[in-house]
Amino acid sequence: MKFPRLASLLLLGVALTGALFAQDAAPAAPASPPAKKKIAITKIAATDSVKARMVGQGVGLSLASVIEALDSQVYDRVLSTKRFEVLERSDADALAKESAAAGTVFQFNQADYLLTIRIDGFNDRVETRRLASLGKTVSARVIEMSAVAKITEVATQRAVASTNFQVSRRQADQLSENTVGKNGESSDILLTDITREMAQKIASRVADAIFPARVLAKRDKVVTINRNDTSGIKVGQVWEVFILGDELVDPDTGDKTREEVLVGKVKVSRVTPQNSQAEIIEDTGIDKLALVRLKDDVAEPAAE
């Protein structure tokens, strides 16, 4: 008889149909969030000529203090951007010894990007003026620093960005008539301030070069920007807003880029631990995910 066979086929068809409906009804698995890029920071150093000049001027300790502080400050500031998994590389020799002891080799290719910083300019001096009418000597300590930061994509060995940063701080003091100089070797707030400022500038540049700031939302005359209170963004700054246009090809090098069309300006009004809000000044097409770049910064408070 053919009935048992027919019944089996019918049951199989019902089972397959049910399985198909079950697949259609099953919710799609949520997309995995993108993994953070890994960045390694090499040990920060000054050029040999800068070190020799500072030792000759008697302010070698100031330079050494800044380098030591900058090493940890850059690590902290880059980590605080919340854009990267930062691989500790401030002491490359120790890491190499650890890896060798474990029978492995610590390689830069464990990171997606490599950040290299070299201090190519430094000054720590005291400018003095005698005011005979007041019977006093007016003195101002001035510290200046210049550094070059280079970001390299490890997989391709392509330089993503190379930028020169310059910072300076001036601190004025009133000294007695008999005072003719001031020791610039001591570590004080001026050295701390200049180190923090340099670290923040470098970290902001690293984040912007790899992950440009973007508009997360637009509500009425306010936009939300994906930069928080540790990214260097400040209330009062003016940022330009761009949308991406056509793909552009350089006829000389063949390099491909995207056209950036200016569509507005915004002024930062609020900064939080999560993001920032800015009031729209000009708008000819600001939309979600548009790029934003700093146009006008706000002045740093003068040291006292």
Image (cartoon, helix red, strand yellow):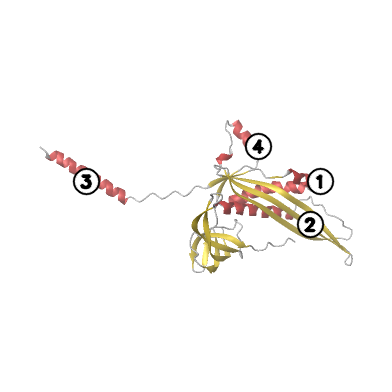
Sequence order check, earlier mark of 4 and 3: 3
Disc nearest the viewer among 1 and 3: 1
Instruction: Give whichever of discs 4 and 2 has the lower sequence position.
Output: 4
Near mark 3 (Cα within 10 A), the count class, few <14, some 14-19 or many ≥20, is few
C-alpha distance separating marks 3 and 2: 87 Å
Q: Amino acid at mark 3?
A: Val
- How far apart marks 2 and 1 lie (CA) works out to 18 Å
Q: Residue at x 81, y 46 (%)?
A: 56
Closer to the camera in the image, 238 or 284: 284
Q: Are marks 4 and 3 in contact (CB under 8 Å)?
A: no
Which quarter of the figure is the N terminus placed in?
A: top left
Work out whether mark 2 precedes mark 1 in sequence or the reverse, and give the earlier one.
1
Residue bearing mark 4: 93
Which image quadrant for residue 197? bottom right
| Sequence-first disc among 4 and 1 | 1
Q: Position of residue 158 (x, y in %)?
A: 57, 45
Say which residue appears at 77% left-offset and 52% top-offset: 124
Q: Quadrant of the C terminus?
A: bottom right
Q: Which residue is mark 3?
A: 14
Going 63% across and 34% down the picture, which residue do you hit?
Answer: 97
Kind of element beneath mark 2: strand
Element on which disc 4 rests? helix
The Cα atoms of the two marked residues, 4 and 2, are separated by 36 Å
Kind of residue indicated by mark 1: Gly
Rounded to the nearest angstrom, the CA distance separating label 4 from label 3 is: 67 Å
Query: Which tag is nearer the camera, tag 4 or tag 1?
Result: 1
Dot label at residue 56? 1
| Residue 35 in the image, given as x and y percentages of width and height | 50, 47
* Residue type, numbered disc 4: Asp
Q: Please say if the residues under marks 1 and 3 sit with CB atoms less than 8 Å apart.
A: no
| Disc 4: CA contacts within 10 A as few (<14), some (14-19) or many (>=20) | few
Give the residue at mark 2. 141
